[in-house]
Image: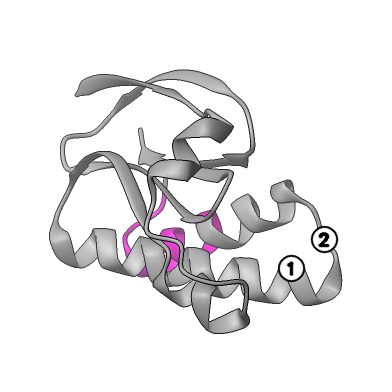
């Protein structure tokens, strides 16, 4: 097991790769802050997060719905026991299994912390 901390900060989004203000721009934005996960699983997490944001943006649902969507998809696809936090500002210190931690953003100003414990 390993421990990692995460701090979401809206100013960090300014350092990302966001281009433009259209729907395709959301697909291009990615900022990874910390990762202890295989590249394949990390890409899967980012894709699932993009899908979750796209669904909830159109329906107007909140960050907890996005976190639940991501967690459930990872429970099914990568063994159960995943935890997920999504938000604009939070602090976290978590203990996770080795190679099961990622902290990233696929939408400017909103952050995803995903880990299995």
Q: Is residue 15 left or right of residue 86?
A: left
Q: Quadrant of the N terminus?
A: top left
Q: Is residue 73 magenta?
A: yes
In space, the residues marked 2 and 1 are separated at their CA atoms by 5 Å
What residue is rendered at 43% in x and 64% in y?
Answer: 29
Q: Which residues are drawn in magenta?
A: 71-80
Label 1 CA crowd tier, 10 Å (few <14, some 14–19, many 20+)? some
Q: Do the residues labelled 2 and 1 touch (CB within 8 Å)?
A: yes
Colour scheme of the picture = one colour
What residue is rendered at 46% in x and 69% in y?
Answer: 19
Q: Name the residue under label 1.
A: 56
Image height check: is 12 above or below 16? above
Image height check: is 5 above or below 34? above
Q: In this view, does 67 lie to the left or right of 48?
A: right
What is the quadrant of residue 116 in the picture? Answer: top left
Q: Name the residue under label 2.
A: 61
Image height check: is 74 above or below 67? below
Q: Is the magenta stretch mostly helix, strand or loop?
A: helix
């Amino acid at each position: 097991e390993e421990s990692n901390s995460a701090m979401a900060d809206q100013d960090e989004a300014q350092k990302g790769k966001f281009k433009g203000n259209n729907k395709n721009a959301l697909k291009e934005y990615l900022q990874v802050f910390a990762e202890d996960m295989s590249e394949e699983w990390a890409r899967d997490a980012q894709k699932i997060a993009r899908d979750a944001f796209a669904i909830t943006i159109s329906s107007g649902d909140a960050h907890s719905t996005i976190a639940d969507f991501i967690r459930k998809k990872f429970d099914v696809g990568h063994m159960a026991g995943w935890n997920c936090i999504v938000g604009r500002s939070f602090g976290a210190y978590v203990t996770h299994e080795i190679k099961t931690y990622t902290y990233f953003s696929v939408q400017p100003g909103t952050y995803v912390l995903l880990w299995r414990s």
